[in-house]
Image (cartoon, helix red, strand yellow):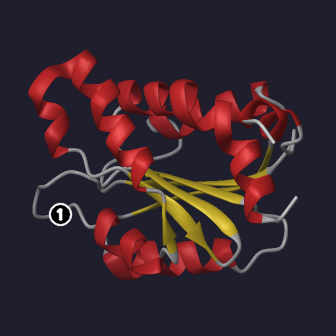
C-alpha cells in the first residue's frame, strides 16, 4: 500500500495529552502549550489532558507514566527541556521511556530548524517514538520550534503514526 493510501486510512481524531516542561511558565504564559492545543483542536483531535511540570526528571516521568496509562490518550506531545542547559532533563526521561524510537523525526526536525535558525539547530534534542502503545513526541519549548514541528511533521503524520502503531 502506498504512503498516501496509509495516510488516507489514518485516524482522523486522536486523544492527545500535552505536557509542558518549564520552571517558569504557567497556563497564562505557556505559549507553546497553548499553540499545540489549538493546532490539535483545529485538526480535529481531542485534548485528553494538559499539564505543566517543573523541569525535574521525577515529575516529568510521573506525568508521562500517568498519561501513558490512560486509555483515552493515543499521543503525548511534550514541549520544553530539550536543550543542553544543566536543567534540561526532558530528553533523558523521554528517551528512557521510549520502546521504539522514530529517529527520522529528530533528524528531519533539526534539518528544518537549521533552515530557520541556522547552526543553533544542533542543540535541539527533539525526539519521538512509541511507548505503551502510544506515540510520544518531545519538542523544544520555543513557540517557533513547536509551530514548525506541529505543522510540518506531526499534524501531517500523527493519525498515520497512531494507525500504524495500532495495527490498522
**Image quadrant in which you'd find residue 159:** top right
Q: Is residue 65 above or below residue 154?
A: below
Q: Residue at x 10, y 28 (%)?
A: 119
148 lies left or right of 44: left
| Image spot of residue 5 (x, y percent) | 84, 34
Residue 139 seen by the camera = no
Residue sitting nearer the eye, 20 or 119: 119
Q: Quadrant of the N terminus?
A: top right
| Image spot of residue 125 (x, y percent) | 27, 52
Categorize mark 1 by other alpha carbons within 10 Å: few (<14), some (14-19), many (20+).
some
| Image spot of residue 144 (x, y percent) | 37, 24
81 lies left or right of 138: left
Considering every residue shown, the one lying at the far front of the view is 1
Residue sitting nearer the eye, 2 or 71: 2
| Image spot of residue 155 (x, y percent) | 65, 33
Considering every residue shown, the one lying at the far top of the view is 116
Q: Residue at x 58, y 80 (%)?
A: 65
**Image quadrant in which you'd find residue 116:** top left
115 lies left or right of 66: left
Q: Which residue is mark 1?
A: 87
Q: Is residue 56 above or below residue 18?
A: below
Which element carries disc 1, helix, strand or loop?
loop
Residue sitting nearer the eye, 68 or 162: 162
Q: Quadrant of the C terminus?
A: bottom right
Residue sitting nearer the eye, 167 or 44: 167
Residue 150 seen by the camera = yes
Amino acid at each position: 500500500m502506498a504512503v498516501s493510501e496509509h495516510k488516507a486510512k489514518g485516524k482522523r481524531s486522536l486523544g492527545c495529552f500535552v505536557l509542558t516542561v518549564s520552571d517558569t511558565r504557567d497556563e497564562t504564559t505557556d505559549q507553546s502549550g497553548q499553540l499545540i492545543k489549538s493546532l490539535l483542536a483545529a485538526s480535529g483531535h481531542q485534548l485528553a489532558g494538559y499539564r505543566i511540570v517543573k523541569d525535574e526528571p521525577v515529575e516529568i516521568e510521573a506525568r508521562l507514566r500517568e498519561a501513558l496509562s490512560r486509555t483515552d490518550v493515543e499521543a503525548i506531545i511534550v514541549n520544553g527541556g530539550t536543550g543542553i542547559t544543566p536543567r534540561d532533563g526532558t530528553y533523558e526521561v523521554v528517551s528512557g521511556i521510549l520502546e521504539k524510537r522514530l529517529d527520522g523525526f529528530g533528524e528531519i526536525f533539526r534539518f528544518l530548524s537549521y533552515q530557520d535558525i541556522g547552526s543553533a539547530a544542533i542543540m535541539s534534542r527533539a525526539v519521538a517514538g512509541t511507548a505503551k502503545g502510544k506515540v510520544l513526541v518531545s519538542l523544544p519549548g520555543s513557540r517557533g520550534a513547536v509551530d514548525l514541528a506541529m505543522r510540518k511533521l506531526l499534524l501531517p503524520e500523527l493519525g498515520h503514526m497512531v494507525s500504524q502503531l495500532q495495527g490498522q
